[in-house]
Amino acid sequence: MNIFVIMKRTFDTEEKLIIHNGKIEDDSATFIINPYDEYAIEEAIRIRDAHGGEVTVLSVGEEEIEKELRTALAIGADKAVLINSEDVEELDQYTTAILIATYLQGQQYDLILGGNVAIDGGSGQVGPRVAEILGIPQATTITKLEIDQGQATIIRDVEGDEEIVEVALPLLVTAQQGLNDPRYPSLPGIMKAKKKPLEIVDLDDLNIDEEDAEAKTQTIEIYLPPQKQAGKILKGELTDQTKELVTLLKSEAKVI
Amino acid sequence: MTIFLTEEDVMIKETARNFALKEIQPIINELHEEEKFSKEIHQKMGELGFVGVPYPEKYGGSGGTWLQFALVHEEISRIDSGVANAIMGNCSVCTLLNTFGTDEQKEKWLPNLLTGKKLGAIALTEPNAGSDASNLRTSAKLENGQWVLNGAKTFITNAGTEITDVIIVAAVTGIDNKGRKNISTFVVPKNTEGLIVSPPLKKIGWHTSDTRELTFDNCRISEDYLLGELHKGYRQALQTITAGRFLIGSMAVGLAQGALDYSMSYIDERETFGKKLRDHQDVQFKIAQMITKIHSARLMVYYAAALRDQNKDFSQEASMAKMRASQVAVEVAREAVQLHGGYGVMREYDVSRHYQASKIFEIVEGTSEIQNIIISRGLMKEYY
């Protein structure tokens, strides 16, 4: 079985965001594999171990992503592909999806896995878009995946409820928390990662013009959420307090 | 030689760090209070290849470097050096077996010890003999094709856990013509009759590390459980301890770094006299001193480990690294508790665990006094 995992490099969850001149500063930030993508990698490895085949982990970005790709190889992926996007000036979900889908069109694939969302942008769009471009079925936010003779049985998390889906391969799925318990890279895995193939592909290799991959969206402004205000403590008789509370909920909070 | 970590080294360091944060930190206070060695943690570390980093893959090791092994010890110790000490004690056994064992002995014991399924213990110290081996009293005599061991050992790491498999014992096997004791080493399987294991000893720190007394009462083992050459056991053991000395140094560095980590969180939270602790210059000077000490000790440990990886003589550097790092551990842990004030002496605060453990480093694997002897001897050899 040919399995691909689409992976994003994101800020470490512990990282504090600093905005400078309207941009998020990333000079001193530590980066990690997007946690939802870790579930996808783990699931891909388990499926490969059970059914045979190969796991290729795929990412879009610039050279520094090699570190996270090597980590994925250390965890157990067989091959890595970096689609170098340095020629594209502005990237968005559209760009990423076009680049990934174009690469995959030239490949044999049975199963494509990704994270449900990336913890930075949080749009959850790239996976579904790739499936659309490739014209294959997709199931998002999955918490269980079983494959038997070209047929997948999936449990999806639908707002806290479960939905069971049966669908034929080839297929794209995105992983929800709870799909599995991702492993750590082992030391022998880390040693082997260095020798595993890591291919770098650019826009020319994919026959894509920069204009065709340019972002469709525009970022107008980036700002941090407002600082939490201190709470208000009401005073006086209980009935007066209740009245004041109702008034405040109406006029100030505007929730009733 | 390069003094920088490779990409691979960094990945190993980060993996060990993540493991320690996610698998050890959440349960460490409970284990520490219960004075309990955790088989589960050790076996998980074994599965990840932390336990057998620099040993051959053929026997279940990871085929890595000694520097990488030091990085693993450091990162685990940053959360709890007692947990790391199980790897450390076990590795002395692995080094002895790997260096001096027969193929048969290696195949029999190394795979389980290097993958964390089982543990090894090394029994050199006796109630009246530490680094001064001339005081050793435990004896081994060959009788009817079996070695018969008699005597007592103490302060033995990993000696009585539920996964302890073998204990390597140094024992007197004769007197040479100058009247000095001939010492040999033996592999004693845990369940051998005549081997009596005491209840765990209570220590001021390292609660998660198993430490016991052993008594050998006509303990009989197979003749081929002699490890290495007869009468060469003392030299073998010394060589092994030298090999492991910088690992103790790396644990001390990890402990100091961990004490600083906890302090950095605390001084960002606590306010005194109208401002955060971290805004007091006295506090700023303290943390500057702490990190500078840690950095110097860390470089010494990495240097000794790198020498070992390049098969160069490293005994002098290992002794200096161990002595300096343990001194740094004591100083930094003490300052870290001072920064925490009253909370620092409360056992529920992580920093107190590091303070408790710090003193041990100036004593294990040769006290600082013994390191001074080794270092000055080496120095004089260079000059005179």
Image (cartoon, coloured by chain):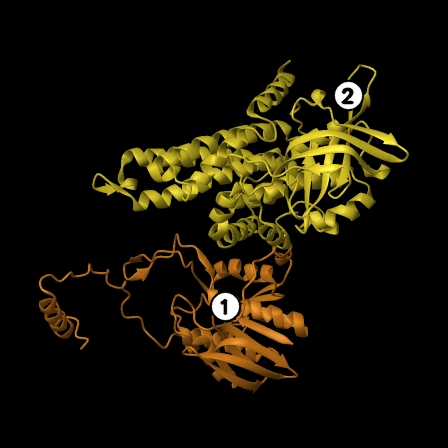
- Label 2: few (<14), some (14–19) or many (≥20) C-alpha neighbours in 10 Å: many
Secondary structure beneath dot 1 equals helix
Residue at mark 2 to residue at mark 1: CA–CA distance: 62 Å
Question: Contact (CB < 8 A) between labels 2 and 1?
Answer: no
Task: Give the number of the disc on residue A37.
Answer: 1
Q: Which part of the image, by quadrant, shows the N terminus of chain A?
A: bottom right
Q: Quadrant of residue A170?
A: bottom right
Q: Quadrant of residue B300?
A: top right
User: What's the residue at 54%, 48% (across, down)?
Assistant: B13
Task: Give the number of the disc on residue B181.
Answer: 2
Q: Colour of chain B?
A: yellow
Q: Answer with left or right where residue B150 lies relative to residue B333.
A: right
The orange one among the chains is A
Q: Amino acid at mark 1?
A: Asp
Q: Nearer the viewer, mark 2 or mark 1?
A: 2
Q: Are marks 2 and 1 on the same chain?
A: no
Q: Which part of the image, by quadrant, shows the C terminus of chain A?
A: bottom left
Check the image and report above or below for B185 versus A159.
above
Mark 2 belongs to chain = B
Examine the rendering and report whether any part of residue A84 can be seen: no
Q: Return the residue nearer the eye: A191 or B200.
A: B200
